[in-house]
Structure formats: C-alpha cells, structure tokens
Image: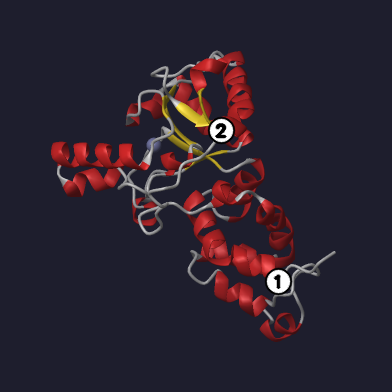
Amino acid sequence: MSGALWAQSAPDPTFRISLGQLTAWVADLPPSIAGPILAHPREFLEDYKPLLSLPWDQMVLVDKGHALPETYAPRDLVRLSRYGLYTSRPTEEMRKEIVPVLLEMSRSARKDGVRLKFSSCYRSWAYQRYLFQHYVNEDGLATAERYSARPGQSQHQLGLAADFGSITPEFAKTAEGKWMDAHAEEFGFSLSYPQGLESVTGYMWEPWHFRYIGKEACQVQKKWFGDIQQYLLVFNNEHAKELKASLLKP
Ligand SMILES: [Zn+2]
C-alpha cells in the first residue's frame, strides 16, 4: 500500500479523513477484515455512510463492557401476540417500530413451512438482574456469565433482540434454526453470538439469539466485517462519531 499517496488525499470524496486515520481505526480488527477495508477504502466508506444516520439504539454496542443505563426502556413496546405473532407467552414484547418486519419475516418463514416462535424478547433491567442471579444460583457465576448477561448488558433490554424456538443449541438443527440462519439478514436480523467467537463476543454460541440492526447494517456486517456483528458494533461505537464529523456537507 502506498501510504504516502493515500495519506495526502481523502479515501472518499465525501469524507474528510485520510487513509492513515482509517488504518488506525481498523488496527484492532483481524487482518482478514482490516485488509479488504484498507484495500477499498472508498467503497467501504460509501457502504458505511447510510449506517451513520440510523437511530442510535439500532447500532448501540451493548456487551460486557458497554451497559445500558438502569433507567433505559424503549417507549414503544408492544405485545407481539396482539399481532398474531407466535410467542412463548402472551406477554412477550418488542418495539412497535419493528413489528412490520417481524410480521414479514414470520410470513416469509411460513411460506417455507416454518413457524417462527418468539421465545424471549424484551427484558427490563430489573428482570435481567433477576434472571442473571437465578442462573448464578443454578450454575455458578463463571458458567452463568458464558450465556447470561448482567443487568444493563443484555441486548434484550433494547426491545430489538429475540431468542427463537427452543433457546438451546439443538435449535440450530431444527427447520426454524436453519431458516433463521439462512434468511434472518434479509429482514435485518443479525446473529449476535456465532460459534467459536466467545473470546470476541463474550458469550458462547447462541444460534437462537438475533438482534435487529436493519438490512443495511446486516449487509455491511456481511461484506466488510466477516459477518460478525460484534466487530461491526465495536467499530461503530468507536468511530461513528468521528465518521459523522468528517462527513462533508453536500
Ligand atoms: Zn437472547
């Protein structure tokens, strides 16, 4: 890479950033991800641009190092059963804003002979605290931390994440699990905790847990971040602000 040339000219005409900056921003990513970004910076930034105007909660990083406040709760929670969606309990809730997507996804699965079951959806901070303690009592702290989040650190608090089907590893082998694995991204749902990435995500493989980040973000996740949500959301958490600030006004 000819660093000198790129350092003097912006990699994308709509951003006021240099390739040197971008190089620093992707330094923590695996070479298999950083390499293609630095080889095609203009294309990357062009693809990334629409993500900068998404609602904050759609892209916010919620993990073991980034907690939501105890006071945070979405304002538009609705019971999914009211819309005819198949749920484990009639009280399961998600954000009203994404109900059309949930209906579309369920209908599409149904056409393929699959019935999507929304098993565990929105969880309040207080409920997550109860749940985590319950698992600690059952399995001990070290084991509980591999599959359950501390209060504030659960994507479920956003009202945009859902556990499907059996909520067990066997889910991956079911028709429902295979359908979600193949089609979730078409509806903007991303698998949060893929297999073999516990050291990256902090959680063991959860083939049943998906978070809505939107179709555009799913495409960027797949094309530029090795289809790993954590890498995308960490990058966004660290650099979205600078990217927005460096965006030239049209
Ligand atoms: Zn979950």
- The residue carrying mark 1 is 246
Q: Position of residue 168 (x, y in %)?
A: 32, 29
State whether residue 128 appears in this view: yes
Q: Nearer the viewer, residue 35 or 205?
A: 205
Cα separation between marks 1 and 2:
32 Å
Amino acid bearing label 2: Ala
Q: Quadrant of the C terminus?
A: bottom right
In this rendering, position of residue 121 left or right of residue 26: left
- SS of the residue under disc 2: helix
State whether residue 114 appears in this view: no
Amino acid bearing label 1: Ser
To which quarter of the image does residue 37 belong? bottom right
Give the mark nearest the N terminus, 1 or 2: 2
Q: Name the residue located 55 percent from the left edge and 48 percent from the top edge.
A: 57
Q: Quadrant of the N terminus?
A: bottom right
Judged from the image, the quadrant occupied by ligand 1 is top left
Q: Name the residue located 42 percent from the left edge and 39 percent from the top edge.
A: 156
In this rendering, position of residue 40 left or right of residue 106: right
Instruction: Pick out the residue farthest to the right.
Output: 250
Q: Position of residue 229 (x, y in %)?
A: 51, 49
Above or below — where is 180 with respect to 31? above
| Image depth: mark 1 or mark 2 in front | 1
Q: Nearer the viewer, residue 234 or 43?
A: 234
Q: Position of residue 186 (x, y in %)?
A: 63, 34
Q: Name the residue located 45 percent from the left edge and 20 percent from the top edge.
A: 117
Q: Position of residue 208 (x, y in %)?
A: 41, 32
Q: Which mark is residue 184?
A: 2
